[in-house]
Amino acid sequence: MGKDKVRLGEELFQKGYQMLESEDKDALTTSGDFLSPISKAAKYKNPKAMFLIGYILCIGYKDLPMNISRGERILKKTYSLLVNLSTEKRDYQAAKFLSEYYRVPLAGHVKDDDKVKKILALSDSYREAELSLDDQALEESSVNETKNIEQTGTSAFDQLVLAIESLNDDGSYDNKERLDSIKSSAEKGNMRAAVFLGDAYKEGKYVPKDADTSRLYYEKAEELGSIKAKFILGQETLTGNFANQDIIHGLNRIYQAAKAGYPEALFSLGEIYYEGRFLTKDISKAYLYFQSAFSRGLKDAKIFIERIDSEKQNSEIK
């Protein structure tokens, strides 16, 4: 590859990486703006950009779809390239990415906390050496501020929901007028209204419990694009709670919700692979799904991550 393409690939990677690091990790947007330069850098065979693409495909990023098999293939090809970049160019970012292979772990590598610490220490030393050679003042990259749109009021639907939720559920179901308004909203194509009613009839909250009616509203919400409804329908179809059990269609819906980044769907697939229910037991896949669910804020996934880590350590000791 020509020097110009290598240089351009590195410039594009740095542009995307700075965009990614400038964001607050707890408030990352779903726009994925950093992916455009990173993807272009990967096309120029930039190893660090290739790693990020593979990593995101395995772990997921907000609402972006996952593709573990493809991500693993990319990460396997990228490993040796990162090693060369780290040892020959003393690239701190390449070293930092290498530590992820042993932290998650990825691409057939075994989790090794000691190795992670050593590689990160090496990365820090590379970074310090790079900074010491820079005589010019470092320019801090400007943080892309997301404009917060202040809502001065709530929609009619929000007001209805707040009104219903403020009522004590005493079993009298005397909020018919408000519920009829939400039903009308759902029929007109309001996805949130359809999900609300699916939840209400499923749980027997504000209305009598009715699995069939719940299913119909979830199906309506799914048609309108609700990932939550898709996941719930997948679960209920898988277990046969709504109708006859259908493992294939149930799993298919859960997979689709997971690819869309829905945390509960990712966690569910982690459990399925971990326990070997409905699918062949696969601890590696379970670990990746739990990691992805945890990265999206589902704290319960950490219990399984730690459990798998412990099981691996015990097996290595034996």
Image (cartoon, rainbow, N blue to C red):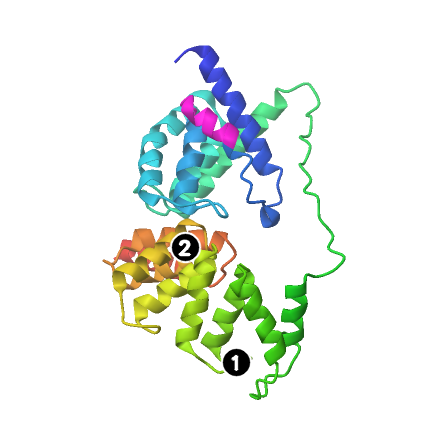
Tell me which label, 2 or 1, sits earlier in the chain.
1
**4 in relation to 246, above or below:** above
The residue most toward the left is 280
Which residue: 45% across, 32% down? 95
The residue carrying mark 2 is 257
Which image quarter: residue 131? top right
According to the image, label 1 marks what residue? Answer: 207
Coordinates of residue 144 in the picture (x, y in percent): 66, 36
- Magenta segment boundaries in residue numbering: 36-46
Q: How far across and down, in percent of the image, does residue 276 sit?
A: 26, 62
Please, what secondary structure does the residue beneath circle 2 have? Answer: helix
**Residue 51: x %, y % from top left:** 41, 34
Badge 2: how crowded within 10 Å, few (<14), some, or many (20+)? many
Count every numbered label the image shows and give the total.
Answer: 2
Q: Residues within 10 Å of mark 1 (few under 14, many from 20)?
A: some
Amino acid at circle 1: Val
* Left or right, residue 167 beside residue 11: right
Q: Is residue 78 above or below residue 197?
A: above
Amino acid type at mark 2: Ala
Q: In this view of the protein, which residue sits in the foreground, 165 or 181?
A: 181
Q: Which residue appears at 61% of the width and 85% of the height?
A: 174
Above or below for 275 versus 64 = below
- In the image, is residue 120 part of the stretch drawn in magenta? no
SS type, badge 1:
loop
> Marks 2/1: CA distance?
27 Å
Query: Is disc 2 in contact with disc 1, using a CB cutoff of under 8 Å?
Result: no
Assess whether residue 37 is covered by the magenta stretch.
yes
Q: Is residue 102 visible?
A: yes
